[in-house]
Image: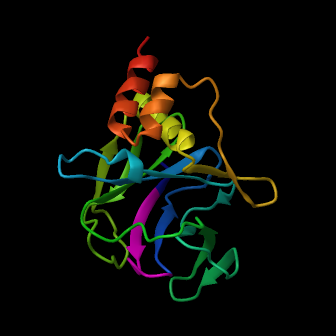
Amino acid sequence: MKVFVSGFFNRGQQNEYVELEAASKCSLEGMMLMRYHYGKNYLPVQGDTRVYLFPDINLRKGNLVRLYTFHHPGKKKDKDETLGKTVYNLSWDLDRTMWEGTDVEVQVMDTGDSVGLAPYDSTSDSVRITDDHQVGMLDPDSLLANMMLGAIDGRVNVIGKDGEVVPVEETDVPQNVKDAVKSKDLDKAFALLLAESAK
């Protein structure tokens, strides 16, 4: 993975963001960030899963990407004078905070991969994590099922050509999956999608 999560900042506040750093020269095209919230059974709560698809930005080694939960009114490209690094500021434009608590996890992955990196201590407002990372695994079928559930439920957006947020629409979704999503039984919908992908 050429991009890793370097920390969470201002958790639970209007200006909270998750920060990524480029480990080498790369493009964000085709990459996504997935936010999971875990329930009492230590499984992701499907209704709380959020997906952000990155715009096509070319990064150099050491560049930072700050994804703000709410709208960030500042410059899209800036310089952090303290760190001496170029920073790309992106807005998720969500309506509530995402990163407070001990039961959240983030994964950054390419649409063709199944591995992402997340800070080991997800409870701290980090002063940039260096080498202390854990690897999170998500098989391709689970990734696809998570994305489809989010799209069916209207929670998956992409950035359009003009920078606007555009919802993803899923077609040819089995009716039993739609019914499960509509009734908020997302665990059932998830299982149904995995069963469909195994056919």
Q: Residue lying at the far left in this picture: please name it.
A: 41
Name the spot of residue 170 as percent of width and height, x first.
62, 33
Q: Position of residue 20 (x, y in %)?
A: 49, 64
Examine the rendered structure and indicate whether residue 199 appears above or below residue 10. above
Residue at 45 percent of width and 38 percent of height: 181
Horizontal side of 6 relative to 31 (left or right) equals left
Say left or right for 21 vs 188.
right
The x and y percentages for residue 177 are 46, 28
Q: Nearer the viewer, residue 83 or 152?
A: 152
In the image, is residue 12 part of the stretch drawn in magenta? yes
Report the residue that reaches farthest toward the top.
Answer: 199
Residue 148 lies, with reference to residue 157, above or below; the image says above
Q: Is residue 186 magenta?
A: no
Res. 114 image quadrant: top left
Which residue is farthest bottom?
82
Residue beneath the point at 44% across and 11% down: 199
Q: Position of residue 132 (x, y in %)?
A: 27, 62
Residue at left 62%, top 51%?
A: 157
Count of numbered marks:
0
Front one among 71 and 182: 182
Q: Is 35 rendered above or below residue 19?
A: above
- Which residue is painted at 46% across and 24% down in the image? 176
Hey, which residue is sitting farthest right in the picture? 162
By what rule are the colours in the image chosen?
A: rainbow
Magenta range = 4-14
